[in-house]
Every structure is written in structure tokens, then in C-alpha cells.
Amino acid sequence: MLHGLFTNLSLYYMTIGPELAKNKRVILYDMRGHGMSEWNDEGFSIASLSEELLKIMDFYNVENADLVGYSYGGTAALYTAITYPTRVKTLTLIDMPLLNEAYFKNVSLNSEEMFQTYRKSVGVAVNKNVVEQAEKKIDKIVNEGQLVDAMTMSQSLLTEDKISTIKKPVLLLYGTKSPFIQTGKLLEKLLPDSQINTVSGDHNFPVKKGKWIAQNITNFLSEKNEAIFFKITKHPKIVLFE
């Protein structure tokens, strides 16, 4: 699984990863510049994140995988399915946005505003020092990582025409109160072999709905008769459940 921006593999580590690991092999990793992974000057375009993903798959001799991506990580997974279809068996997209004008209207990249929204959403108290450190990392990713430019460039890589070429089975998991719920409905129309399941919650629903996500993915892969599941998040720091 690929985690989203400004988070790390811990999004999956406590609940989703262990649940899936009861029946499947699970690989988690922190994306470049996130968690315990090092900074990478190549930036955060979905193309570069896809290349990073493929390098990790190659390192573990994974010919193709069941990819799971949350939020921005989902866009990298989607791009991988479009560009390298033989490397993907199935695709699960968790509240993934499309990088269009509507995305920038719904998302603030101001670190202070992001934390206020997050705390209100999940109802979790965060230590002041932790907040300050996280805000510095967010600002570095946005500014030094030229995130807005990377997102803008990525728009042409995920057009509706390109998305509709994906023939792999796709599971879409979205929060009913998420600003991206309409994206999920659009993707269901564009992707010929897709299904959408929704749960009460906003964009941060994976924090509280881990078991629901794990159960949906397990059922989906069981229906598709898949033998091996690889959960992918982001760069070098890797956790392997076997």
C-alpha cells in the first residue's frame, strides 16, 4: 500500500497491516521524505513515486502485486497501473483524489491549517513539540519538494481517457463525507472492472476505520482469487510481515 502525503507507514501498521498479514504477505514502506525515509531531491511527482515503488518491488523480486494506495499514494498506484499494467494484479484506491482544479479548492497545503483540520477530524490530541516538528516537515515537502508543481504536472498523467484504459480489478473505498466522494463515483464509471464501497467519515477515515478497510480488501482479493497481497506505502524504511 502507498500511504498519503505527510503521513507514514504507521497509517497501516497498527490495524490494517496486521489484519491483512493473517492471510497475505504484506510489505509497508515510508515514502521518500516521510517517516524514517531519507529526503530525495527528485521530488514528489506521481511518476517518480511510481518508479520508487517499482524499485522496491524489484528488490523483493515481486513481478506483480496487489497495490493499495491512500490519497496521494493512490494517485501513484493508479499511474503505475496505467503505465506498467503487467506489474499490477489488482488495485485498491482509498479516498484518492484526482489532481484537478477541484482538488486544489478542497485541500489546503498550509501546515497549521492541515493540523487543525486533522485534529478536528480524528479527535486526537497531539503533543505541541510533535506538531511543530511535523509542520516543519510538511513545509519542507511543500516548498523544497515543489509539491504544487509536481501535482500540477501530474494532472496530464491521470486524464479520464488514460484511467479508462485500466482493465485490472479495482476496489474503491471512500468516506461519505469526504470532499473526494464524487471522484470515487467518477472512477467507478471510468474503470470497467471496479466496485465502490463507502463508509461514514471524511478523508481521514482510515485512522478510525482500519478494520473496515482490511475486511473490504480481504473480501475483494478473495473474490478475485488472488494468492499474494503486497501492501505498499512509500520509500526505504520497510516493514515486512510474513
Image: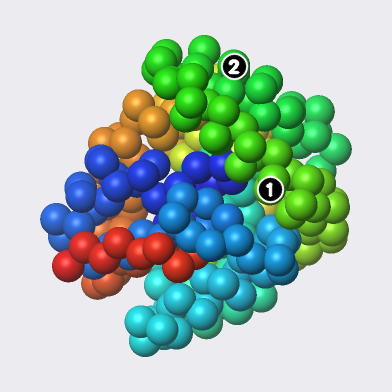
Q: Nearer the viewer, residue 153 or 127?
A: 127
Query: Secondary structure under badge 2?
Result: helix
Residue 74 shows up from this direction: no
Query: Secondary structure under badge 1?
Result: helix
Image height of 133 relative to 226, above or below: above
Residue 141's mark?
1
* Residue at figure coordinates x 34%, y 40% from the top left: 213
**Where, by quadrant of the figure, is residue 47 drawn?**
bottom right
Identify residue type, mark 2: Gln
Look at the image and tell me in which quarter the N terminus lies. bottom left
Q: Position of residue 135 (x, y in %)?
A: 61, 32
Residue 205 shows up from this direction: yes
Q: Position of residue 184 (x, y in %)?
A: 60, 39
Identify residue type, mark 1: Ile
* Residue at figure coordinates x 25%, y 59% from the top left: 222
Q: How crowded is the residue under tag 1: few (<14 C-alpha within 10 Å), some, or many (20+)?
A: many
Q: Position of residue 147 (x, y in %)?
A: 76, 50
Left or right for 60, reference 198: left
* Residue at figure coordinates x 53%, y 22% from the top left: 118
Left or right for 239, reference 148: left
According to the picture, the residue beneath numbered tag 2 turns out to be 116
Between marks 2 and 1, how big is the CA–CA gap? 18 Å
Label total for image: 2
Image height of 69 relative to 101, above or below: below
**Where, by quadrant of the figure, is residue 62 drawn?**
bottom left
Label pair 2/1, CB-CB below 8 angstroms: no
Look at the image and tell me in which quarter the C terminus lies. bottom left
Q: How crowded is the residue under tag 2: few (<14 C-alpha within 10 Å), some, or many (20+)?
A: few
Q: Earlier in the sequence, mark 2 or mark 1?
A: 2
Image height of 139 relative to 8, above or below: above
Image height of 33 relative to 56, above or below: above
